[in-house]
Image (spheres, coloured by chain):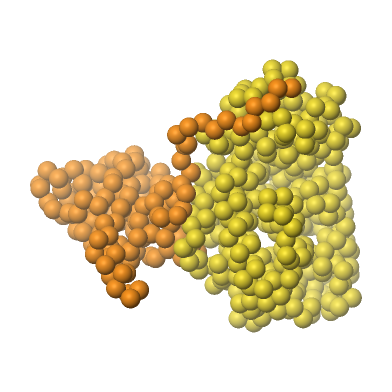
């Protein structure tokens, strides 16, 4: 199979100087020495075909966290190139190693069935105000599924969605929550299943239009990224505004009745790669945390654009290297002296909690993990 | 009108049920049912697994993705498990599966967990009869006609060829 040249052009791969900065910063290369973005590019360009890459399991190892893009002097978009080659590989019948036996991928693909009638809104407590349709829509994402599936991780994954709706209600917004919402397709797209991603996106666009949305709020970084960048790339400009809810919240902080509960807690914040490097959203989560009296934010050594990834993406290729990356990140967090690790992405929380539950029983990775919106919601009267 | 077509559909509808049967109890039970010439509907496709504990929720979801109308997970009784705690693990896995299936809005009749020992051929035949009837009433899976399973393509697609 020859190389997809338009992919090379659009991702600047032909500008590569082979300086190796990508490999030097790559969190995967740090532990998995057979993985090297520089070598992968070099191999592909020198051999003139992508065959080797398509058959290589290393193709699925990249976390697409964009840390290499951040450091690249030539603006090579390695993560995007991985995605393009994965799409080719997927249509040629190659598959990544699915985590959890592929249960999550199957769930995503089952959601492409148009006649499916999900029962996904049972978790919303009665005291929260939501509607069936309206101009403001809250896109919940996969949280109900994670909460149902990851029962072994003792974590309330719906707390994030709960807090989001609670805070919206505080700001006088009664969001519409869609009973027929499907997966945003982020994971399918990033592991190369373009066809099913499009199917999910089409369905979601249809129901968002049917709800009469002018503004769609996201609390999940992946959904936010997918609707901001990927769906417009495939389907053109959207008729509604895509809003990352914590950003909206940070802009409306003065309208939020924050109280101090007298508790002093030291927190550290983990930048999710989809939110940080993909969407350039570093400030609003920090603004929110700094706005709370009792919260002291201590940054990890690697934060902001240099933050390391949580070690797994798209529910595939989770291996011992992922665990090492996660342990290292947890050690980073712990070494700040913080009491709580705050994340904006539920998947990051799941991955970290999984490592903490794992066989590695070291005290230096034990740190309570909390969701950003939950911390804010607790501080609001 | 709609009701009539639905009824007609029901009569014609032959459910396809995937059965995960463990090697030590449920699969021999199915064998014995056959040896004893017990009658049960031919709507099942048995997949033998070494242990019911191996049946990850992913297997069942994959079966649905590929068009199964219902899935039966059949293991040993807890105290008979060949691998000591396999049947228990099967029950744990099943609980997680149930959560997801509920969210997906699939009817509860579409999944079932059973404990059938090698000596219970009659129970095996009865469970299959019951389940086939129940699923026939519920109708075809909503995932079947339009859901595209993740199967390997027949032909390998070629992306555009350009020389550089």
- Dividing the picture into quadrants, the one containing residue A68 is top right
Q: Is residue A324 above or below residue A338?
A: above
Q: Residue at 66%, 22% (x, y): give it.
A: A49
Q: Is residue B55 above or below residue A254?
A: above
Chain letter for the yellow part: A
Chain B's shade in the image?
orange
Left or right of A252 on screen, residue B78: left
Q: Residue A10 in the image: x percent, y percent?
A: 77, 36
Q: Residue A23 in the image: x percent, y percent?
A: 79, 29
Quadrant in the picture for the C terminus of chain A = bottom right
Q: Is residue A118 above or below residue A199?
A: below
Q: Is residue A354 visible?
A: no
Q: Residue at 49%, 54% (x, y): give it.
A: A110
Q: Is residue A168 above or below residue A94?
A: below
Residue that sits furthest to the left in the current view: B36
Q: Residue at 36%, 47% (x, y): give it.
A: B52
Quadrant in the picture for the N terminus of chain A = top right
* Of B28 and B110, the residue lying toward us: B110
Q: Residue A43 in the image: x percent, y percent?
A: 71, 20
Left or right of A180 on screen, residue A115: left
Q: Residue A334 in the image: x percent, y percent?
A: 79, 49
* Of B50 and A313, the residue lying toward us: A313
Left or right of A315 on screen, residue A331: right
């Amino acid at each position: 199979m020859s190389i997809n040249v338009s992919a090379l052009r659009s991702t600047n791969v032909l500008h590569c100087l082979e300086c190796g900065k990508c490999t030097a910063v790559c969190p995967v290369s740090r532990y998995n020495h057979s993985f090297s973005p520089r070598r992968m590019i070099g191999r592909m360009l020198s051999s003139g075909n992508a065959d080797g890459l398509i058959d290589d399991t290393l193709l699925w190892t990249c976390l697409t966290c964009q840390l290499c893009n951040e450091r690249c002097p030539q603006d090579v978009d390695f993560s995007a190139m991985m995605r393009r080659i994965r799409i080719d590989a997927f249509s040629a019948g190659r598959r990544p190693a699915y985590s959890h036996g592929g249960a999550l991928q199957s769930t995503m693909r089952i959601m492409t069935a148009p006649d499916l009638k999900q029962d996904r809104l049972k978790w919303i407590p009665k005291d929260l105000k939501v509607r069936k349709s309206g101009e403001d829509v809250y896109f919940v994402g996969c949280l109900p599924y994670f909460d149902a599936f990851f029962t072994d991780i003792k974590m309330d994954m719906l707390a994030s969605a709960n807090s989001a709706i609670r805070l919206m209600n505080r700001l006088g917004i009664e969001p519409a929550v869609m009973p027929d919402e499907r997966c945003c397709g982020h994971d399918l797209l990033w592991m190369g299943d373009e066809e099913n991603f499009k199917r999910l996106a089409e369905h979601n666009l249809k129901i968002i239009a049917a709800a009469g949305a002018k503004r769609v709020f996201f609390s999940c970084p992946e959904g936010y990224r997918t609707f901001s960048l990927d769906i417009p790339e495939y389907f053109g400009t959207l008729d509604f505004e895509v809003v990352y809810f914590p950003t909206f919240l940070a802009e409306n902080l003065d309208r939020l009745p924050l109280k101090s509960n007298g508790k002093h807690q030291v927190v550290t914040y983990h930048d999710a790669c989809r939110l940080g490097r993909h969407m350039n959203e570093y400030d609003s989560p920090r603004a929110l945390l700094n706005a709370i009296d009792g919260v002291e934010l201590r940054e990890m050594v690697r934060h902001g654009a240099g933050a390391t990834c949580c070690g797994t993406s798209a529910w595939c290729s989770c291996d011992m290297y992922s665990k090492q990356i996660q342990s290292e990140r947890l050690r980073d967090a712990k070494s700040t002296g913080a009491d709580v690790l705050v994340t904006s992405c539920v998947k990051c929380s799941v991955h970290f909690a999984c490592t903490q539950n794992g066989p590695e029983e070291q005290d230096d990775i034990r740190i309570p993990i909390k969701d950003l919106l939950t911390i804010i919601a607790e501080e609001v009267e | 009108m709609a009701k009539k077509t639905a009824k007609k559909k029901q009569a014609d509808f032959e459910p396809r049920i995937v059965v995960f049967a463990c090697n030590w109890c449920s699969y021999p039970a199915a064998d014995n049912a056959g040896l004893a010439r017990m009658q049960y509907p031919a709507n099942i496709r048995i997949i033998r697994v070494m242990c019911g504990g191996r049946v990850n929720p992913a297997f069942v979801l994959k079966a649905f993705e590929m068009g199964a109308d219902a899935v039966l997970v059949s293991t040993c009784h807890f105290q008979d498990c060949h691998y000591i705690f396999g049947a228990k693990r099967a029950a744990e896995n099943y609980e997680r599966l149930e959560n997801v299936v509920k969210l997906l809005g699939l009817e509860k009749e579409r999944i079932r967990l059973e404990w059938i020992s090698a000596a219970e051929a009659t129970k095996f035949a009865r469970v299959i009869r019951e389940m086939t009837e129940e699923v026939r009433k519920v109708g075809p899976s909503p995932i079947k006609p339009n859901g595209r399973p993740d199967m390997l393509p027949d032909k390998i697609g070629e992306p555009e060829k350009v020389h550089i």
